[in-house]
Amino acid sequence: MIMTKVQSIIIDAVGHEGDTLHVRFTSGDTYRYWPVSDKEYDDMLQADSIGGHFTRTIKNQKEYEKEVNNER
C-alpha cells in the first residue's frame, strides 16, 4: 500500500485501495476504514481540513480495524 503524506494535525498519511481507506495517525497507529469510495477519498484529500473532513465523514461512520503491522 502506497501511503501519501498529508498536511494534518491528526493524520500523517493516507492510502486507498479498493474500498478500503488506510489512515496512519500522527501517533503512529494505522487503521483501515471501509467501505470508502474513490469519491469519498478524493473529497477528503481536497478538503480544507483533511482531519476535520475525516472526523465528520469517515470516523465513527465506517467499519474499521487497527492494522497490526504498520510497515505498509
Image (cartoon, rainbow, N blue to C red):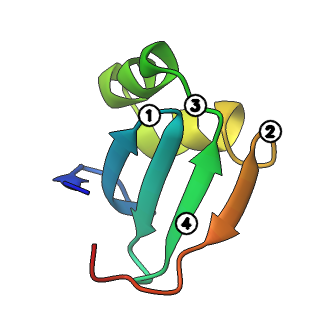
Of label 1 and label 4, which has the lower sequence position?
Answer: 1
Asked whether the beta carbons under mark 2 and mark 4 sit within 8 Å of each other, the answer is no
Camera-side residue of 8 and 4: 4
Q: Quadrant of residue 16?
A: top left
Q: Is residue 8 visible?
A: yes
Q: In the displayed structure, does residue 10 sit left or right of residue 8?
A: right
> Tag 4's secondary structure?
strand
Kindly report the distance in space between the C-alpha atoms of the residues bearing marks 1 and 4: 15 Å
Q: In the displayed structure, does residue 45 sit left or right of residue 22?
A: left
Pair 3/2: label in front? 3
Asked whether the beta carbons under mark 3 and mark 2 sit within 8 Å of each other, the answer is no
Of label 3 and label 2, which has the lower sequence position?
Answer: 3
Asked whether the beta carbons under mark 1 and mark 4 sit within 8 Å of each other, the answer is no
Of label 1 and label 2, which has the lower sequence position?
Answer: 1
Q: Is residue 47 visible?
A: no
Residue occupied by mark 1: 18
Residue occupied by mark 2: 61
Q: For label 3, count other residues whose C-alpha is less than 10 Å away and answer few (under 14), some (14-19) or many (20+).
A: many
> Tag 1's secondary structure?
loop
Residue occupied by mark 4: 31
Tell me the kind of residue under disc 2. Answer: Gln
Q: Of the numbered discs in the image, which one, if any, rests on residue 68?
A: none
On screen, 67 above or below 16?
Answer: below
Horizontal and vertical percent for residue 50?
A: 42, 39
Q: For label 1, count other residues whose C-alpha is less than 10 Å away and answer few (under 14), some (14-19) or many (20+).
A: few
Q: Quadrant of the N terminus?
A: bottom left
Tell me the kind of residue under disc 3. Answer: Val
Pair 3/1: label in front? 1
Horizontal and vertical percent for residue 10?
A: 45, 63
Residue occupied by mark 3: 36
Horizontal and vertical percent for residue 27?
A: 44, 83
